[in-house]
Structures are given as C-alpha cells and as structure tokens.
Image: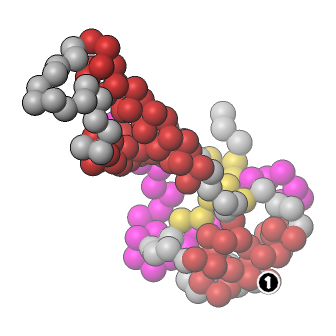
Amino acid sequence: MAPKNIVATFRDEANLLKAVTRLKENKVNMLDVYGPFANHDLLKKLTSESKLPYAAVLYGIIAIVSIFGFMYYTSVIDYPIMYGGKPIFSFPPMVVIMFLFCILLTTILTVLTFHGRAMIFPGKPANIIDPSVTDDTFFLVLDQNYNPEEIKEWLKEDGAEEITEKEL
C-alpha cells in the first residue's frame, strides 16, 4: 500500500506561488506541481540548476576526440592513400565533418541522457492526477513528511480550493 499524499487544488497561479513559497520556507517536501501551462516563477522556486549542459559539453568533447581519432586511424593507419602529391592526413577538409558529427553525437547523447534522467520511455503509463489539470487547474502534490493538519491549514490560508489525500 502506497503512502497517501496531500493534493491541493488551485485555480489562481498567484495563490499557488504563495503556497509554494510558504511550504518551501517550512521545508515541506513538495513532490510535483501539475498545471495547464508552464509557470517560470514556479519552476525557479521548485527546481535547481540542471546539470544537462555540463553533460552536453562533455559529450561534445568526447565526440570531437573520437571522430578525430577515427578519421586519423582510417586515413593514416588502416588505409593510407597517396594521390596527387597530397599529404596522407590533411586536417582542414575534415574540420567540417568533425563539426557535423560532433553536433550529431552530442544531440543524440544529450537526448538519451535527458530521457534516462527524467525516466521517460516508450510505453510508460501516464500519471494523470485529475482530468481537469489540462483545463484551468493547478495541482500541488505534497508528501506527508510533516504535520498534515498544519500543512492543510497553510494551504487553506493560501487559497487552495480543495485539499484531498490520494495514493499516487
């Protein structure tokens, strides 16, 4: 049996932002916020800086090094071709190929990292808390790691329209 979570319903995003601010000050564990659109102020309060850009830079460096190594191996070590007096390994023509493969590999690896980190995969069942979340209602899901009655009182003071307990 899964533990029950507190689910508060808000119609006004200002009230939701006020409630999130108060709950964060009191160190209440907020699991998620579901809403009909993205609210950037809410995202700033609930999330921390993503490490994904650092991973993308690392993937870009790995891609450049591996593409350069592959091109050097194929043109100098494995199958050197002397034609027209040109050098065996000519770097300038390979810059464009290295750049494009760097972009390709960095994009693919970053997308795979994002999907793995967010646990998004084909066939994953949707967790729809309520059908009205896509219309005009925000849902704030809280863990009961604190005094539930005090949390419910704070939510009522901050403008929650409905407060229920659900297993998610």
Foreground residue, 141 or 163?
141
Magenta stretch mostly in which secondary structure? loop
Q: Which residue is found at the position 17% from the left and 20% from the top?
A: 81
Q: Which residue is found at the position 47% from the left and 50% from the top?
A: 127
Height in image: 41 above or below 116? below
Q: Position of residue 65 (x, y in %)?
A: 46, 33
Q: Quadrant of residue 156?
A: bottom right
Q: Position of residue 115 (x, y in %)?
A: 45, 43
Look at the image and give the residue range highlighted in magenta.
122-149
Q: Which residue is found at the position 22% from the left and 17% from the top?
A: 80
Q: Quadrant of residue 84?
A: top left
Height in image: 80 above or below 115? above
Query: Would you call the spot at circle 1 few (<14 residues within 10 Å), some (14-19), or many (20 or more)?
Result: few
Q: Is residue 113 visible?
A: no
Q: Position of residue 166 (x, y in %)?
A: 63, 53
Q: Position of residue 83 (x, y in %)?
A: 11, 26
Q: Is residue 47 visible?
A: yes
Per the image, label 1 sits on a secondary structure element best described as helix
Q: Residue furthest front?
A: 85
**Residue type at mark 1?**
Glu
Q: Is residue 144 left or right of residue 150?
A: left
Residue under circle 1?
A: 157
Foreground residue, 29 or 116?
116
Q: Quadrant of residue 117?
A: top right
- Quadrant in which the N terminus is drawn: top right
> Does residue 144 show up magenta in the picture?
yes
Height in image: 11 above or below 91? below
Foreground residue, 88 or 129?
88
Q: Residue furthest top?
A: 78
Q: Which residue is found at the position 74% from the left and 53% from the top?
A: 143
> Does residue 89 show up magenta in the picture?
no
Q: Is residue 95 left or right of residue 6?
A: left
